[in-house]
Image: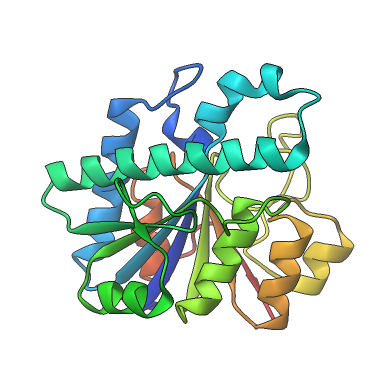
Amino acid sequence: MKPVYKRILLKLSGEALLGDDPYGVNRETIDRIVSEVKEVIDLDVEVGVVIGGGNIFRGVAPAAAGMDRATADYMGMLATVMNALALQDAMRRVKLRSRVLSALTIQQVAEPYIRGRAMRYLEEKRVVIFAAGTGNPFFTTDTAAALRGMEMNVDVVLKATKVDGVYTDDPKTHPDAMRFHKITFDEAIVKKLQVMDATALTLCRDQRLPICVFSIVKKGALKRVVIGEDEGTLVHS
């Protein structure tokens, strides 16, 4: 099996780490995700990961109501650092070499994000986990994934969700909804499909960086996307 992508950027939401838990990191779930990443690494693919923080920030969200937006966003960035460390530890347990690079300076627990260093780690076949989003408030981790994907010269941004692609309607409430196999950026924007937030989608469109939306819950889906099988939805130019 030969991969169709040499270097990928995996966008993981914090919620992907929840499993069946109400908040926090589910050990079984994170181990399963890491095993999926390892399958791709074994194909000699270079992997970067941008991770969200919703699984942790959800627990403090009620307290953040009415809080200054920038302050709340910085709290969310710190949550992504916690998830990145949990992901790195899970990778260590299966002998996967990884590095956490943070857009916020927290030198005791993570290296600062430096583009050249990140590129070198990828070339050395280390998984690079990008934490703290872009390091700026008012930007989502979707936008961070688009930005890091462009900076790392990846072939594709893979957005991991709980749904196996982009549909004409919500498949949970509309069983007859159809999955798009491929769709253009312009179609996704016009039809207001929830692929990524508008800023991330526009960035990827302008730089002609394709996005593939797939299910991280579906066993083996990540590997099938990487080897070019019909999995998920490819958003392209």
Residue 157 on image: x %, y %: 52, 66
Q: Is residue 153 left or right of residue 185?
A: left
Q: Residue at 30% across / 46% down in the picture?
A: 109
Q: Residue at 62% across / 55% down in the picture?
A: 142
Residue 76 on image: x %, y %: 58, 38
In the image, 27 versus 5, the foreground residue is 27
**Numbered label tally:** 0
Can you say which quadrant of the picture contains the N terminus?
bottom left
Residue 226 on image: x %, y %: 38, 67
Answer above or below: position of 22 versus 39.
Answer: above
Q: In the rendered image, which quarter is residue 8 located in?
A: bottom left
In the image, 189 versus 223, the foreground residue is 189
Residue 178 on image: x %, y %: 71, 50
Answer above or below: position of 191 versus 121.
Answer: above
Q: Is residue 2 visible?
A: no
Q: Is residue 80 visible?
A: yes
In the image, 97 versus 211, the foreground residue is 97
Q: Is residue 174 left or right of residue 125?
A: right
Q: Residue at 37% across / 45% down in the picture?
A: 84
Residue sitting at the far right: 190
Answer above or below: position of 119 versus 72.
Answer: below
Q: Is residue 18 left or right of residue 167?
A: left
Q: Is residue 18 left or right of residue 77?
A: left
Can you say which quadrant of the picture contains the C terminus?
bottom right
State the scheme by which the image is colored: rainbow
Answer above or below: position of 225 versus 138.
Answer: below
Q: In the rendered image, which quarter is residue 112 located in?
A: bottom left
